[in-house]
Amino acid sequence: TIERGYSGHSIWNWDELPDVVSPRYREYARANASVGINGVVLNNVNASSKILSAEYLAKVAKIADVFRPYGIKVYLSANFAAPMQLGGLKTADPLEPEVAAWWKAKADEIYKLIPDFGGFLVKANSEGQPGPCDFDRTHAEGANMMARALKPHGGIVMWRAFVYSPADADRAKQAYIEFQPLDGKFDDNVIVQIKNGPIDFQPREPYSPLFGAMPQTDQMVEFQVTQEYLGHSNHIAYLAPMWTEFFDYVSPSSLKAIAGVANVGNDTNWTGHPMAQANWYAFGRLAWNPQLSSEEIIDEWMPMTLNYPENTPKEVIDGLKKMMLNSREAVVDYMMPLGLHHLFAFGHHYGPEPWCDIKGGRPDWMPPYYHRADSTGLGFNRSSSGSNAVAQYPAQLAKKLDNINTCPEEFILWFHHVPWDFKMKSGATLWQELCNRYQSGVESVETMQRQWTAAKPYIDPELWNDVNERLMTQARDANWWKEGCLLYFQQFSGMPIPDNVTPPVHTLDQLKGIKLGISNYECPTPELLNSKR
């Protein structure tokens, strides 16, 4: 299976390799090369040490042979405890000579099989994964030890900064606290890989303050192409606008590389939702030309993929383009507008569960930790009067974010605990604006459905039916999000839902009763309770 994969099983047939090499490997390499992707990490960041065994390296070498003509290097996620788990050592302490020698010998073994091997990706001391901190060593000491094993061969280490040990009461601050003091201490073939936002691939986040805060350290951004938090492969969510928004704050010239958590599986169309191919395409295009607009990219992608005839009316094509360009903002509105974040159902992250608060669970895995709803207002106070996460940003931006009246409204509930009766720029109160945004999200999906219906005569019937069914699911889910969140937050605001907002047809208890069982590679298709809508 694929963790956070919603388009079937893995394309790698490990049991058949190295004897049987699927023709899809070549097709996959060709597709990546067509948009400029020049490296692939073959395995999960929650890595099994088995991938570094002689048995599996022979399999990896076969994939590398397929990729080589397309200019694509193979990389592997490495488990930091591999010297213990695979090599039988008593420790993985990066300062122990026998540990460094094990990694050097392993690197030599790999490069004999794969002369152009790219290097290692490492998730360390995060979510239970082993790392140098287990031995009272720093991330830099761990990364440098591995990098020195690769250095003679020209390999690199991509060291993930996705950590959130409880160094501070605000999870959004923790990666900065742990990594920023290490600036200048990483070897020159180490790149610190940082998620675009400080939490975890939310529909909208401010950029991670680590970008620009480590000027003596090579950095790369990690985007999520798969839609873990954006309706899996049931929802249209064109992500180029999210990524160009990131580049509005972070200069591409400050980055050494760009990584994307892939959305590719063994489904016939690769990505489950046919329109999700746009994100794979956009990732590659933006990696080499971050100045491209979301519209320019969709103008390239749409006619190649939808293959509509030349006589397709302009208004139909314009409608399809708007459907794609507006889709991400629609998702933000019907899921978590105004800077709300992490309101998802526990574990699988599909559907709303702002009420989830499992006893004994990590507080920062629970939605109430993030939304902080109470009788006075809503949102996480990260201003100077709260956790002071704003202080991690450059001074001019920090000043803007710190003031509730100048903080961009798309981030206002990220940085402030806002009173329910606070007047927004529209003149509405926070509560009214919240209701309006959820209603807008639902209506945007209904508009997307009409735009897709108008294109029916010009689209291949199988493709049209597939997307149409998923749009029906997306419309249902948008209502589910709207009703669940508004009914839940209404308990705290004590305010009526405005007349211009379609009233819920379910009770909060009914919505709380929806339980989904989801595998790693399947999208849910739950039947909501009977609805008149």
Image (cartoon, rainbow, N blue to C red):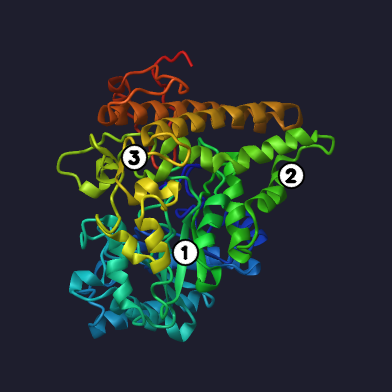
From the viewer's perspective, is residue 130 above or below residue 525?
below
Q: Position of residue 55 (x, y in %)?
A: 41, 65
Q: Position of residue 404 (x, y in %)?
A: 36, 50
Q: Alpha carbon of mark 2 to alpha carbon of mark 1: how far? A: 29 Å
Q: Nearer the viewer, residue 390 or 219?
A: 390
The image's mark for residue 343 is 3
Q: Of the residues under marks 2 and 3, which one precedes in the sequence?
A: 2
- Specify the farthest residue to the right: 311
Q: Nearer the viewer, residue 124 or 24?
A: 124
* Residue type of the residue flagged with mark 3: Leu
Q: Is residue 10 left or right of residue 376?
A: right
The image's mark for residue 303 is 2
* Residue type of the residue flagged with mark 1: Val
Q: Please state which of the two labelled residues, at mark 2 or mark 3, is closer to the viewer.
A: 3
Q: Nearer the viewer, residue 307 or 14?
A: 307
Circle 3 residues within 10 Å: few <14, some 14–19, many ≥20? many
Give the quarter of the image for residue 516. Answer: top left
Q: Is residue 161 left or right of residue 326?
A: left
- Label 1: element kind: strand
Q: Which residue is mark 1?
A: 221
